[in-house]
Image (spheres, grey):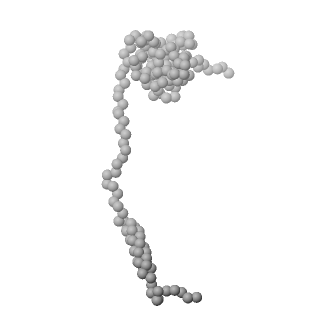
Amino acid sequence: MEKKTLNGKIHPFSLIGAVVFALVIIGVAFLVFRRQNGQQAPAPTNPEYLVTLLPAPTETPTAIPTTMLLTPTSEEVSILPPDVVAVGRYVKVSGTQGVGLRMRAQAGTSGDVNFIALDDEAFKIIDGPLVSDGYTWWLCEALLDKTRSGWAAENYLLVLDISTPSP
């Protein structure tokens, strides 16, 4: 078997390929060692942060009642019938047909809505009554979250019977 060669000479394309390959290897090595020597691109000096500005809370205005009813004392509450709404009693939202009851910042239909209380949600009466816009209003406070409070119309409150059963 005979090999065909060009008179013992190296083909010119082989020489060009070897030189290009050597240059690529040298270039890759240069980039790798350059990064290892700490010559990386400098980090930005002024980083940007996304910030959401929230408005400061404002003072809630005090409601000025149009008509003030007397608030019963604890002795008077005990002699009231069990189904009468009074300060210190526990109530639940009822009769909204699933729409919920607007708990307002002030007594009256023009007061800002703090939140919507759902049917059967329980509250403690902490102030009232005030009569405004044809409704009797009571200040209600959620049982587990003291920040959830608001004025509610008595028409949508049902007194809860919280009596301790005897053994």
> Is 66 situated above or below 30?
above
Q: Position of residue 105 (x, y in %)?
A: 41, 22
Query: Does the image show residue 117?
Result: yes
Q: Residue at x 45, y 12 (%)?
A: 135
Q: Residue furthest left?
A: 45
> Is 165 situated above or below 24?
above
Give 11 or 47, whichever is nearer the viewer: 11
| The C terminus sits in image quarter | top right
Q: Residue at x 31, y 54 (%)?
A: 45
> Is 72 situated above or below 145?
above
Q: Residue at x 54, y 22 (%)?
A: 98
Q: Quadrant of residue 127?
A: top left
Q: Position of residue 111 (x, y in %)?
A: 40, 19
Give 47 or 85, whichever is nearer the viewer: 47
Q: Residue furthest right?
A: 167
Left or right of 52? Residue 161 is: right
Query: Does the image show residue 91?
Result: no
| The N terminus sits in image quarter | bottom right
> Is 77 situated above or below 31?
above
Q: Position of residue 57 (x, y in %)?
A: 36, 31
Q: Residue at x 55, y 88 (%)?
A: 2
Q: Quadrant of residue 9?
A: bottom left
Q: Position of residue 19 (x, y in %)?
A: 41, 77
Q: Quadrant of residue 92?
A: top right
Left or right of 11? Residue 167 is: right
